Image: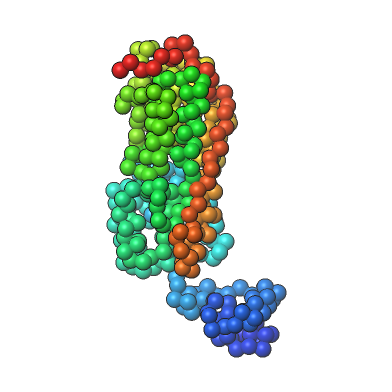
């Protein structure tokens, strides 16, 4: 392996000049920097990470707080995102340092990251409209990027999907299939993405003169058990009052709805329709459900590489306004949706 001194000798430059060129110091001219970079690639030079960190004053580490669900289980959506993020950062020789915390205890972990000064930036996930974590990062001038938006007009760097567009399309499809009693299983109502999805659902129904009883809109953790419990209660209602369709914020919730439908003796697609948002979790393929699930599709793994690039740009002082990306979600219609059954043609009466 070529050393820094050997590279400098090959170029006829001092080791200090070569080091400054490799680390982007402004006093090194563009022509010299280009020459050094070309030679380092030709000679297969790999910089000493510790030396680089000493030279730049940066740790080469990015922080993240890993949220656990009640009972200390791991959210599979977040785990898949974490895997793609870690892989993308590693490709750029940046280490991901993460803590595990409950939703209630996250802020104290962010404070610790800021106080200890061991990371060059932070990646936040599942933002709220008035998020104390974001306020903390901004007050300490620590570079950060966010997976999602707490508000539609967020001023920070973020990668998000078009939640409103996705759930507008899902609700519209069901209404056009004749459904008037559409239940909605959503994420926690304090989270930005859940508010965006609920807003789109409400807007479509209002535009068609439809309304939904509050008990048929459920916010909470997006798990199979919460989906099952909510759907089982709704499907136990008298036929004239139960939903003919469900919209779910997660395929995990949709699994629970399918289980409740089976227990109620309802055939999915003809007697009960289901649409879910699909993060494309590798162990839970919506096309393999029975029947295949109609979804709004946006792979959560896409967020990892995008946010890795964004946090590196923020650490290089790229303005947040230049680092805001919204990815479209595709509506994929499959066999879990169909025309409204006769018993579901009327809107809720109470």
Residue beneath the point at 67% across and 79% down? 35
Q: Residue at x 46, y 64 (%)?
A: 319
Quadrant of image for the C terminus:
top left
Q: Do we see residue 237 in this rendering?
A: no
Does 102 appear above or below 266? below
Residue 192 in view, yes or no: yes
Q: Position of residue 6 (x, y in %)?
A: 65, 84
Which quadrant would residue 109 be assigned to in this image?
bottom left
Report x, y in % for residue 108: 29, 57
The colour scheme is rainbow
Residue 226: image location, x then y, percent = 37, 31
Q: Looking at the figure, which quarter contains the N terminus?
A: bottom right
For the point 48% across and 18% down, the residue is: 178
Q: Residue at x 57, y 28 (%)?
A: 333
Above-or-below relation of 284 to 43: above
Q: Is residue 298 above or below residue 63?
A: above
Q: Quadrant of residue 247?
A: top left
Left or right: residue 290 versus residue 203 is: right
Furthest residue to the right? 42
The location of residue 225, given as percent across then percent down, is 39, 30
The answer to whether residue 227 is left or right of residue 132 is: right
Vertical position of residue 334 compared to residue 222: above or below: above
Looking at the picture, tell me which residue is in the foreground, 310 or 10: 310
């Amino acid at each position: 392996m070529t050393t820094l001194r050997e590279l400098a000798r090959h170029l006829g430059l001092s080791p200090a000049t070569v080091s400054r060129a490799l680390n982007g110091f402004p006093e090194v001219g563009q022509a010299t920097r280009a020459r050094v970079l070309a030679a380092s690639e030709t000679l297969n030079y790999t910089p000493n990470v510790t030396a680089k960190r000493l030279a730049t004053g940066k740790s080469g580490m990015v922080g993240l707080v890993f949220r656990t669900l009640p009972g200390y289980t791991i959210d599979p959506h977040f785990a898949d995102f974490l895997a793609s993020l870690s892989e993308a950062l590693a490709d750029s020789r940046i280490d991901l340092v993460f803590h595990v915390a409950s939703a209630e205890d996250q802020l104290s972990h962010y404070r610790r990251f800021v106080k200890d000064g061991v990371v060059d930036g932070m990646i936040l996930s599942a933002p709220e409209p008035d998020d104390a974590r974001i306020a903390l990062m901004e007050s300490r001038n620590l570079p950060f990027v966010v997976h999602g938006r707490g508000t539609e007009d967020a001023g920070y760097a973020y990668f998000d999907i078009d939640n409103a567009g996705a759930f507008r399309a899902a609700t519209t499809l069901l209404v056009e299939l004749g459904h008037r009693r559409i239940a909605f299983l959503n994420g926690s109502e304090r989270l930005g993405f859940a508010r965006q999805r609920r807003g789109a659902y409400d807007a479509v129904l209002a535009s068609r003169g439809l309304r939904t009883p509050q008990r048929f809109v459920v916010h909470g953790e997006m798990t199979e058990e919460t989906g099952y419990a909510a759907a089982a209660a709704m499907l136990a209602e008298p036929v004239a009052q139960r939903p003919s369709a469900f919209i779910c914020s997660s395929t995990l919730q949709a699994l629970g709805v399918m289980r409740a439908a089976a227990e109620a003796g309802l055939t999915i697609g003809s007697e009960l329709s289901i649409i879910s948002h699909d993060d494309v979790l590798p162990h839970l393929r919506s096309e393999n459900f029975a029947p295949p699930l109609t979804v709004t599709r946006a792979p959560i793994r896409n967020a990892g590489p995008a946010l890795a690039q964004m946090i590196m740009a923020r650490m290089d002082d790229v303005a947040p306004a230049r680092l805001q990306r919204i990815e479209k979600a595709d509506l994929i219609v499959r066999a879990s949706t169909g025309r409204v059954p006769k018993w579901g043609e009327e809107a809720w009466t109470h």
